[in-house]
Amino acid sequence: MTGLPTAVRTHLAALRMLLLLTVITGIVYPLAVTGVAQAFLGHTANGSLIRDDGRVVGSGRIGQSFDLPKRNPGDPDEAPRPDPKWFQPRYSAGAYDPLRSGASNLGPNNPSLTGTIKERKAAIAAFDGVRPEDVPADAVTASGSGLDPDISTAYAHEQVYRVARARGLTPAAVRDLVAANTHGRVLGFLGEPYVNVVQLNLALSRTA
């Protein structure tokens, strides 16, 4: 090695360092992080999967649509019809497809957005049997990711009577389900209470 030209020795040293760092950052570090995640945060690291009798029915991190079957399954342009028996999530610009995650990117004063929100508010009010002014803001707007599974407690309670009627349950029983599936503020003071629609509908499916 001592008889090698300086340039060759420099390149060999760089190659050894490259191999060492590749092993550390490409193998050792990822395995260590994965091990710690599985040991202490396994549920979250594996996608916060929600299971029903051992079968995966969704993720606590990704919303789902709860719609009626299509009248014409072969028609890709047929508008979805929300199922009145289920609590409905927020709107999703990508129809809750993780590959289409994102927002509409329309500003709050964009005429297209304001017109769409007005139409959504009227449709939700008619669907839930409430006044348009009683429809919460999160019911007519999508989250930044378009995949948010959570809704406000106000939107959950606004849907209680419609779900109760559709399932033949008492409003009090449905309201108790909402309360049981309401998450409080983070650390007791950050954010607002919320309801995970996927978890709430799973609890609903077990009652009737």
Image (tube, helix red, strand yellow):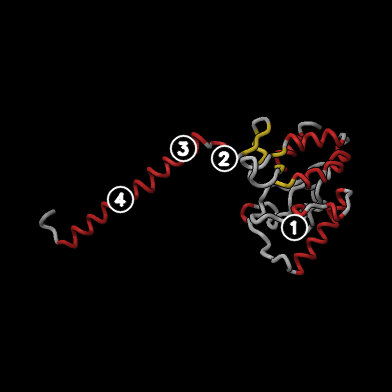
Q: Earlier in the sequence, mark 4 or mark 3?
A: 4
- Viewer-side label of 1, 2: 2
Residue 14: image location, x then y, percent: 26, 56
Q: Secondary structure at mark 1?
A: loop
Residue 17: image location, x then y, percent: 28, 52
Q: Earlier in the sequence, mark 2 or mark 3?
A: 3
Q: Which residue is mark 1?
A: 76
Residue neighbourhood size for the residue with mark 3, other residues' Cα within 10 Å, grouped as few (<14), some (14–19), many (≥20): few
Three-letter amino acid code at the position of disc 4: Leu
Kindly identify which numbered label has been placed on residue 19: 4
Residue 27: image location, x then y, percent: 38, 45
Q: Secondary structure at mark 2?
A: helix
Q: Nearer the viewer, residue 144 or 59?
A: 144
Count of marks placed on residues: 4
Q: Which residue is mark 2?
A: 44
Q: Earlier in the sequence, mark 1 or mark 3?
A: 3
Q: Which residue is mark 3?
A: 36
Residue neighbourhood size for the residue with mark 2, other residues' Cα within 10 Å, grouped as few (<14), some (14–19), many (≥20): some
Q: Earlier in the sequence, mark 2 or mark 4?
A: 4
Whether 4 is drawn above or below 31: the answer is below
